[in-house]
Amino acid sequence: MTMLHVSGSQLRAPDGTPVRLRGVGLGGWLNMENFITGYPANESSMRAAVRDVLGEDRAELFFDRLLTSFFTESDAALLAGLGMNCVRIPVNYRHLESDERPFEIIEHGFRHLDRVIDLLGAHGIYSVIDLHALPGAQNQHWHSDNPTHVAAFWQHRHFQDRVVNLWEAIADRYRDHPWVAGYNPVNEPGDPSGKVVGPFYDRLVKAVRAADPRHVLFLDGNTYATDFTVFREMYENTVFVCHDYALAGFAHGGPYPGYTRGEWCDRTQLEEAFARRSRFQRETGTPLWVGEFGPVYTGDQAVDEQRHQILRDQLDIYDAHDAGWSLWTYKDVGLQGLVCAAGPYLDRFGSFIAKKRRLGVDRWGSTMEETAEELAPLHRLLEDEAPGWDPYPWGARYQTDDLVRHILLAQALLPEYAALFGGLGDDELVALADSFLLERCVRREPLLDLLAANLRG
């Protein structure tokens, strides 16, 4: 073997040495997310609103500079210094193929992905390429760049054909790259029927293997990497990826240990949740890898120390099971990142980000209590008139919040966010983007110390 590969329940380097991939997700970069960079709604809607204000060329100036500044050699060095050996890189398909010209690969769109994969490799860090947003949207939420609550990817063969074509191009491009650990072709699929995702994986695996027979495949289970009953056969050289977010670690999480929305959460519950989510992998004897996990931070020192304890406990559990992991997420504007942007960007958008927080329009940052008084009559109406309504994936309360807060209200705020770019010169746009340079970011030192201690322990 000339690449990292699966051998029984372990990943191994070409020389046969066991490798446990431990690192971070590079969220908000090639797949931007509202809570990470401070905009409302979904990425393509945000980019369109900003283009309306800046024009095509100046919008491209800002966004390209942001992608350049968001991850540089300094970031790779920081992660290597912590002891990490893996970065999961979420990608929006729109960088590599467009809805206007489907099936045509955009060569220029690979430039930043190539750059960061090479930077990481130079520091001894593997990359897992993660297609986080697919044409038509593979799940019901903003992080698949979905402006609706419908995962249309599973309804239209056209979207599926495009993804097969795209992955054939990606696999062919990186087939000989030794620092690409492998491919995570569908992030958090949300196929409501559960009947399309399994056959699609069968088809996709064959296509990718034909283009690149050596790299590892990292396959998420259905329903946001939690349901593995959809796999009808075992694939060679494959890791089945679970996601393992702790209930008490969400924005609406309660004390730890303690109750969150009526459910007790402590270390025992974390162990039980991980055992349940990793059962398929353990029964099949395949490697354990947690593709996403990690608590949300509040700025309250006492609460955040509880969130740090959640993280310590999860890392200890993973260590006990020899499980690899990818913590979500590396860099943002203050909710969850190891490092957080500062400077001109926060000066300009800080008040707007605070307004988003007050309204709870970012799903990942919402406590589900914002605008509770305004939404209460709607919740009661639905409970009275449609008591049996239990929509996929998370039920009535979450669906109502998604439709009203995280789609309707969020999209209504897009013009306000875009207007904040108005009147800025090119130098000012560059300064906004450069607020994400590592040397201009604030580091969460307790979090960095916690991770370094685990990785070096």
Image: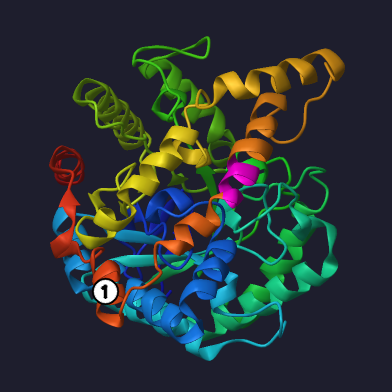
Q: Tell me where residue 132 appears, x and y as whole percent.
A: 55, 60
Q: Tell me where residue 140 appears, x and y as whole percent.
A: 68, 47
Q: Tell me where residue 192 appears, x and y as whole percent.
A: 78, 43
Name of the residue lying farthest toward the front? 423
Residue found 67% across the figure and 25% down from its top: 397
Q: Is residue 296 magenta?
A: no
What residue type is disc 1 on? Glu
Residue found 85% across the figure and 20% down from its top: 386
**Type of secondary structure dominating the magenta stretch:** helix
Q: Which residues are magenta?
A: 406-412
Vertical relation: 231 (above or below) 145: above
Of 14 and 141, nearer the camera is 141
**Circle 1 residue:** 428
Image-quadrant location for residue 292: top left
Q: Tell me where residue 255 appears, x and y as whole percent.
A: 35, 15
Q: Quadrant of the C terminus?
A: top left
Vertical relation: 435 (above or below) 296: below
Vertical relation: 333 (above or below) 406: below
Image-quadrant location for residue 427: bottom left
Q: Is residue 411 magenta?
A: yes
* Label 1: which secondary element: helix
